[in-house]
Amino acid sequence: MIVPENATAAGEESILAGSPAMFFFGTDTYSRITRIPGIAQASPEILVATLSGAACCSDYLQIIAVDPEHDFTLAPWLRSNPGVVLGKDAIIVGSRVEGEIGSPLLFYGHSFLIAGRLEPTGMRGVDKAVFIRMEDAYIMADESGQRAEKPLVLPRGMVSNVLVRLEPGASPSLVANAISRNIMGTRALTPASLAGTVTRHLEGITVLLHGAMLIATLFSLPALLGSSVLLARETKQEITLLGMLGATRVFILRLVLAEAFSASVIGSLAGIAGSAIFLIAFQDAVALALRIPFAIPSVPTLLVDSGSAFLLTILLGGLISLYPTVNLVRSETFRKIGE
């Protein structure tokens, strides 16, 4: 994606975090980009940030106006969904945009109808975006002076960014350098540069999370050992009563281990359920706070991570239960009980 150099941060925020943005190139920038060697196809886009909290607008979203003649981003999806047509006043919405297919959305006083909905991508710049035709964007801007609380100004012939598809074998970094060198005031956002931005955003929070995990573990061990001591004392009273009722040593030992196992299972399942609820309920807040793409992991990934946490909890629970179990086996009360 080629963006104005002074809008690099805004372009990254728009793609990664879905923050609505508006910026423009010079009038001839698009045609000059198409002449750079190594570019097979170029798709111009106009970014329009909707008004926040205004009666003329359905929500604070990023509108992306595309040129159907040159677009190669929505085109494959439209071909795989032949019943969806991006016609006059029709819009394609991201997965996180509210509204049913066929329902209207109002932007700058202009009414559009939802023609289709994209699948979730995890990129808020797509999932929270609305795609329209450039022609409709200009009509919306022309009408905004009378219909909207704030007029929308879209200079004709100017675009916000250009998506480029490279020729087979072309190097993204070399083409990006060629664009920046030949067209002053531009910046190329490549997958590598966006990945670097995400990594920088995550560095601090990763260190914080690892530190919090270590501290929580260190503080929980004394609590678990303390509970084991209390359990060992309580167990002596229980086994005395069970021995009087005729329970065998094997039965009592199994009972103690079963209690520890059950506590570990219940605790791990409660922790996994709590984490899942937090992950689902606050995924938008996490993505906005960290300014990164965020999507719920796939079911196999969730099962692997949950299973690992479950097994680790069972292992720790088993180790902690060794203290009351050893005390039980060594106790005089336990020795007096029959086999």
Image (tube, grey):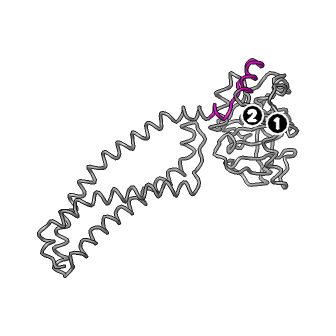
Q: Earlier in the sequence, mark 1 or mark 2?
A: 2
Structural crowding at the residue carrying mark 2, measured as other residues with C-alpha within 10 Å and reported as few (<14), some (14–19) or many (≥20) = many
315 lies above or below 16: below
Given the image, on which type of amino acid does mark 2 rest?
Val
For residue 191, which quarter of the picture?
A: top right
| 152 falls in the magenta region | no
Q: Is mark 1 in CB contact (under 8 Å) with mark 2?
A: yes
Residue 155 visible to an observer of this rendering: no
Tag count:
2
- Taking the spot 48% from the left edge, 37% from the top edge, the residue there is 205
Q: Which residue is mark 1?
A: 137
Residues in magenta, as a range: 174-194
The residue tagged with tag 2: helix, strand or loop? strand
Circle 2 is placed at which residue position? 48
Residue 117: image location, x then y, percent: 74, 51
Name the residue at 72% across, 27% down: 3
- The disc labelled 1 sits on which kind of residue? Ala
Q: At x 72% / y 36%, what residue is drawn? A: 50
Residue in view at x 69 percent, y 42 percent: 126
Q: Is residue 49 above or below residue 122?
A: above
